[in-house]
Image (cartoon, rainbow, N blue to C red):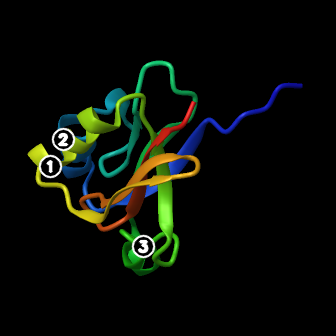
Amino acid sequence: MKRSIAHLSLLVKDYDEAIEFYVNKLKFILKEDTKISNTKRWVLINPSSDSGCNLLLAKAVGNDQISRIGNQTGGRVFLFLYTDNFERDYQNLIDHKIKIVRKPSTEAYGTVLVFEDLYGNLWDLIEPKD
């Protein structure tokens, strides 16, 4: 049996502001936005059309979930975004005034920087070495 991770939940304050950030600023693809109820939606985004794992934008409900928005991993880098063109995506972050936490560096595994999303979650942007 072949298995894979299909979706990862990302806690957000508001569906529309999260879609605005990820789709319009980070250039992700909005794969699905389905209304489940008056307060809940099924919102899937993906960095590219051929990437396997989606992010499920999950609107936080209740104090426990709300307290974890922007800090789902206790301050560690949460997500790792691979790119085939580091300079293009780095310039996109600058153009959209997205906070760079750690400037680009060349490491054994590739070129990397750390940025914050709209809620403060930390991401690595990585162009792997061949």
Q: Amino acid at mark 3?
A: Asn
Residue 117: percent from left, percent from top: 29, 58
Residue 95 placement, left or right of 14? left
Dots 3 and 2: beta carbons under 8 Å?
no
Residue at which label 2 appears: 91
Depth order, front residue of 119/87: 87
Residue 78: percent from left, percent from top: 49, 61
So how many labels did they put on this image? 3
In this view of the protein, can residue 59 be seen by the observer? no
Q: Amino acid at mark 1?
A: Ile
Residue 123 placement, left or right of 76? left
Q: Please, what secondary structure does the residue beneath circle 1 have?
A: helix
Dots 1 and 2: beta carbons under 8 Å?
yes
Q: Quadrant of residue 25 in the image?
A: top left
Q: Amino acid at mark 2?
A: Gln
Q: Please, what secondary structure does the residue beneath circle 2 have?
A: helix
Residue 24 placement, left or right of 33? left
Mark 3 → mark 2, Cα distance in angstroms = 25 Å
Residue lying at 18% horizontally and 55% vertically, measured from the top left: 98
Residue lying at 54% horizontally and 36% vertically, measured from the top left: 129
In what quadrant of the picture does the C terminus appear? top right
Residue at which label 1 appears: 94
Residue 71's mark?
Answer: 3
In what quadrant of the picture does the N terminus appear? top right
Q: Residues within 10 Å of mark 3 (few under 14, many from 20)?
A: some
Residue 33: percent from left, percent from top: 34, 32
Q: Residues within 10 Å of mark 1 (few under 14, many from 20)?
A: few
Extreme-right residue of the structure = 1
Label 3 vs label 2, nearer the camera: 2
Residue 110: percent from left, percent from top: 50, 45
